[in-house]
Structure formats: C-alpha cells, structure tokens
Amino acid sequence: MAIVVNAYANADDVLIAWQPDPWPADWVGFQLERRNDTNQQVTVLVNRIPPKPGQGPVQPTGISSDQSPIRRCIWTDHSVVETDNVSYRVTAMKGPLNGPFTLDATSVSGWTAPLIASGDAGGGLSAFFNRGTLMSQIVTRFVQGNVTSDSLRQFLKNLATPGFEARLYLSGDVLHEILGFLRDADRRGSAIHAAIYEMNDHELVAATCYSATAAQLSHGSPRS
C-alpha cells in the first residue's frame, strides 16, 4: 500500500498532495508530518476540524492530525516561513469514523525531497503571493467566536489597519515585499514600473506616494 507524496513551496506556504494506491476501506484519514531538514526535528501538523462530527470548534492551536486525521489528499502548510528547509510524509490512520484512531504502520510514505520556502523564481525574478480569501473557520478564530453583525463589521474595518493580525494573514509575504521594495527604491536608484488595478489600500498608496516623492526630490525635479 503505497502513498506517493509531493510538495510545492512558495515564500511562505507549502502545498502537499498525496495519492494512495490502493485506498483500503478501513482508512479514515491521514497523519501529516513535517521534517525540518536543518535540524531533523519532526512535527506532526495540526488539523482544524474536530475528530467527531458535530463537535464544537477546535482550540486555536488546532488538533494534531494523529488525533483528528486529515480526511483529504491535499493540504497547505501555512506555518513555514521563507528560508525554511522542509520535507513531508504521510501515514494513513485506521479506525471507526468517530475514533479512536491508530496509525497504519504499513502505509508510511517516504519523505518528499527537501525544499526551501522561497520567492526566488530564477533568472533574477521573485514571486510573492497574498491570500485572497478568509475561510469562515479562520474568521471565527480571529473574532474569538463572536460572529455577531457588529463584531464582523468591526473585523472588516480592522482589515485596513496596518499590523492587524488578519490583515497580515491575508497579505502573505507580498505586502511585506512590496513595502520593502518601495521603501528601498530611492536608495537603490531604481525606477518602479507597475500595472496597478483599483489599488485602494491606504498603506500601499501612502508608500507609493512617498517613494515617488523621494525619487523626485533626489533627482532635483519635485512635481505635485
């Protein structure tokens, strides 16, 4: 019973996908492990879904996937950061649908090839991404379970506040990289060329205006 696993990284996420062949009827899900290939430390990744149907929300830190198996064959690890050197492996979990669950020792996959979380796309180019949506479970955690209309309206307003935790989550690494690029453009003597559509984020607008003004002043040609 082989499980083939592949992993794909960008600067701050790793997508892991696996395919069991065959899939025995007594498998109910999977344990997913991450290995730090720098120090060889192994961590069991957490699931955000309770192990039994109808159970309430899980704790903010999640539930280990050996206690609440991942019941799918694809997962995104949001806990990596740029320069992390990691590998992953998958083990099937057996047992009744409501648990308790046990590892199927015969199903342990091999480790994926080591990969480094990085925005480097080669050829002097880098690619960074945001996260365009927030799942309802994540919003619930950010508002600490208070999903009233007033709470959600305030949450939406707070998304415009620099440093707000949910804003940082949504922006991924791309906001950090853009702000850093704009901040350093004048120091590098660089020109900025951008295709911008409906940019209404106040933090980005302010940083762009500041960078453009600084560049104009440094070249002795201030313009309004």
Image (spheres, rainbow, N blue to C red):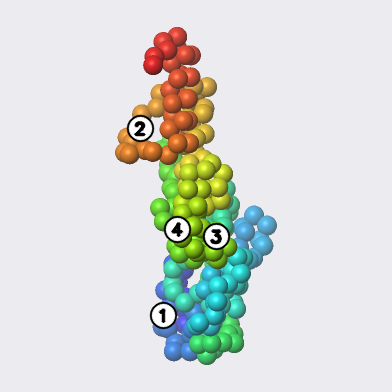
Q: What residue is disc 2 on?
A: 194
Q: Earlier in the sequence, mark 4 or mark 1?
A: 1
Real-space Cα distance between discs 2 and 1? 47 Å
Q: Residues within 10 Å of mark 1 (few under 14, many from 20)?
A: few
- Pointer 4 residue: 134
Confirm whether residue 212 shows in the render: yes
Say what amino acid the circle numbered 1 marks: Asp
Tell me, for residue 143, which label it has, or none: 3
Q: Are marks 4 and 2 in contact (CB under 8 Å)?
A: no
Three-letter residue code for mark 3: Val
Q: CA distance from mark 3 to mark 4?
A: 12 Å
Image x and y of residue 88, in percent: 54, 65
Badge 2 amino acid: Ala
* Label whose residue precedes the other's in the sequence (4 or 2): 4
**Marks 1, 3: nearer the viewer:** 3
Residue that protrudes farthest toward the top in the picture: 220
Q: Closer to the camera: disc 3 or disc 4? A: 3
